[in-house]
Amino acid sequence: NRNDQGPPDLDEAFRKLQNNLSDMFGGKKGSGGGSASSGGGFSKGMFGAVVLVLFLGWVVMGVYTIDQQERGVVLRFGKQLPEVILPGLHWNPPLIDSVLKENVTRVRDIRIDSEMLTEDENIVKVVNMTVQYVISDVSSYLLRVKNPDVSLIQATESALRHEVGSAVMNDVLTEGRGALGAQVQQRIQDYMDDYGTGISVTQVNVDETAPPDAVRAAFDDVIKAKEDEVRY
């Protein structure tokens, strides 16, 4: 009868489980408490070995190298530590610290092609304008702005429109093109400093400026006429 059954013997069940574990890990069967003592001693040794292996693995996981071209920052439980990690071999506790590193010597570049309006209400095409930059502050670059490279592209377009919009078409297309690059570079750098991106703009090259395609032939005729006038 099911109702006549008493509660299960927990001590007996525990002894059976302990004997099974002892057999599994190579313990010798015995009678009574001797078997439990032998199995328990072996289990403690295995447990200590597993803990030691896990600890050594944890230590090895924390070793890392910062290359000569790189600098790093450390986040401890998500909070930035003040020191910048310099090149060399380092150790930080894994799962507690996370290390972010970035190349700070590589010269990067972006390219911009755009059409915009000059001060005298003419449309000018800026073709293959190149902005070269490096990371001057790794902490700001990695942590202060969500996507500093996108911010640089947007700042470049804004600076270019401001400078072209303050000039007349003839200056942008001819002798003023060299000055345009320097002015745009200074304005971009001001934006980057204000945003705190950690980016340093090293060079801005305006490879070509041109009138819109629809009027380019007429503009070329005007330039040719001026050249003929000078030659005559």
Image (cartoon, grey):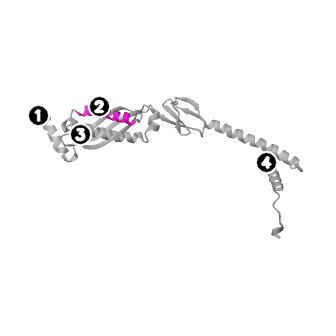
- Observer-side mark, 2 or 1, equals 2
Q: Earlier in the sequence, mark 4 or mark 2?
A: 4
Residue tagged by mark 4?
25
Residue tagged by mark 3?
165
Residue segment shown in magenta: 176-195
Kind of residue sitting beneath label 1 = Glu
Question: Is there a contact, CB below 8 Å, between mark 3 and mark 2?
Answer: no
Determine whether the residue tagged by mark 3 lies in a helix, strand or loop: helix
Provide residue 203's location: percent of width, then percent of height. Answer: 34, 32
Q: Earlier in the sequence, mark 4 or mark 3?
A: 4
Q: Residue furthest bottom?
A: 1
Report the side of 61 relative to 126 (left or right). right
Residue tagged by mark 1?
229
Q: Residue furthest right?
A: 31
The circle drawn on residue 128 is none
Task: Give how far apart the Cα atoms at labels 2 and 1 are.
Answer: 31 Å
Residue tagged by mark 2?
182
